[in-house]
Image: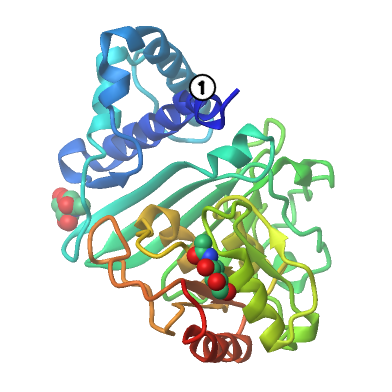
Amino acid sequence: MPLSISLNLFAWIDWSVQATISWILSNTFGSKNVSIVAEEDVQTLSEPESAGLLGKVASTVNECLAEASRYGLKGPDKSLGPSEILEAISCCNSNGGPLGRHWVLDPVDGTLGFVRGDQYAVALAFIDNGEVVVGVLGCPNYHMKRDRHNKQQQNHISSEVSLPSPDMLEEGCVMYTRKGTGEAWVQPLVYGDRKYEWPNFAKQVHVSPIDDPALATFCEPVERANSNHSYAAGLASSVGLRNKPLRVYSMVKYAAIAQGDAEIFMKFARAGYKEKIWDHAAGVLIVQEAGGVVTDAGGRSLDFSKGIYLESLDRGIVVCSGIKLHEKLIGAVYASWESSSL
Ligand SMILES: *[C@@H]1O[C@H](CO)[C@@H](O)[C@H](O)[C@H]1NC(C)=O
Ligand SMILES: *[C@@H]1O[C@H](CO)[C@@H](O)[C@H](O)[C@H]1NC(C)=O
């Protein structure tokens, strides 16, 4: 089966997540008062021959909202019908921009990872006058570090709750942050029937302290179509990286840097490709607040104020756990660029 067909079979997941989050945001902040920039549009789903698909999306959304009400979010009084589902998806039609406040959503980032039972993420960010101020990454197949003796963690675990058992930690995690706090947090996504109450199950994440390229690990997109692997390999060897690259689907790469599982994430898309803000906003802020550095390949900050694309992005994206690795890589980019035909 061609890949495009198999991915289309999963589009109902993207719509379901987008409708669920859109409905929750609209009902929390008032539908007239939220602007959402999101990946999916409603075109295909509103066509008459998509009725079956729409039904499937509706039942998934209603199931999710019923579940959400167990976690203290108010669900709808009665099940949402098809028109309400379409409305929830189609109201995510903002183009963002430099002014005002915008939610930025990638309902399922890394569809191929999702399809393969590998890494994928649900990514939500909040942009205020062009700056990302909140970032949340749900990573259903990515585990929290099992560092139970972490001091920070103990400080934030209240005494009457017990830690999730190790097998619970296998259930994926959610990572989140707010700009300027200097803190990024992670907590398990599923904990039996217990309701989460921050910060009972949460712990702070920090980038890795490793700044020796010989010990550092870099991650990059799995697919060659998304990043020039050979160019990244050239940079890696020129700065003295020795470990093999870790190829990871989706924004989980940002989570891996924030949590200290890798030190570097590099992405060099083909010339002419424009990066979308929903593929980066949440991850960038989480890495920065966890202590890392994110810039384009020219060393400049990413600009989330230009609408749905990272318009002025220079060549690629370089994410590092610390400034020393970052300086080396940016230096290597400049040194290499003349001879590369990217
Ligand atoms: C929502 O409304 C409140 C006032 O009720 C206002 O302060 C706030 O800026 C509005 N938010 C957005 C996103 O427009
Ligand atoms: C990838 O980068 C190399 C330089 O390292 C270049 O020769 C090659 O053309 C690039 N490939 C693509 C698809 O851009």
Estimate the x, y position of residue 182 in percent, counting from the top left.
Answer: 51, 76
Q: Is residue 45 left or right of residue 152?
A: left
Identify the amino acid type marked 1: Leu
Estimate the x, y position of residue 233 in percent, counting from the top left.
Answer: 67, 73
Residue placed under numbered mark 1 in the picture: 9
For residue 291, above or below residue 89? below
Q: Nearer the viewer, residue 167 or 42?
A: 42
Q: Nearer the viewer, residue 65 or 117?
A: 117
For residue 13, above or below residue 57? below
Q: Quadrant of ligand 2?
A: bottom right
Q: The N terminus appears in which quarter of the rendering?
A: top right
Q: Is residue 281 left or right of residue 320?
A: left
For residue 259, above or below residue 16? below
Give residue 156's quadrant in the image.
Answer: bottom right
Q: Residue at x 83, y 67 (%)?
A: 149
Estimate the x, y position of residue 195 in percent, counting from the top left.
Answer: 61, 37
Estimate the x, y position of residue 120 in percent, counting from the top left.
Answer: 59, 44
Please indicate, yes or no, whether residue 290 appears anywhere in the rendered image: no
Neighbour class for label 1 at 10 Å: few (<14), some, many (≥20)?
few
Q: Nearer the viewer, residue 199 or 10?
A: 10
Q: Secondary structure at mark 1?
A: loop
Please indicate, yes or no, whether residue 246 appears anywhere in the rendered image: yes
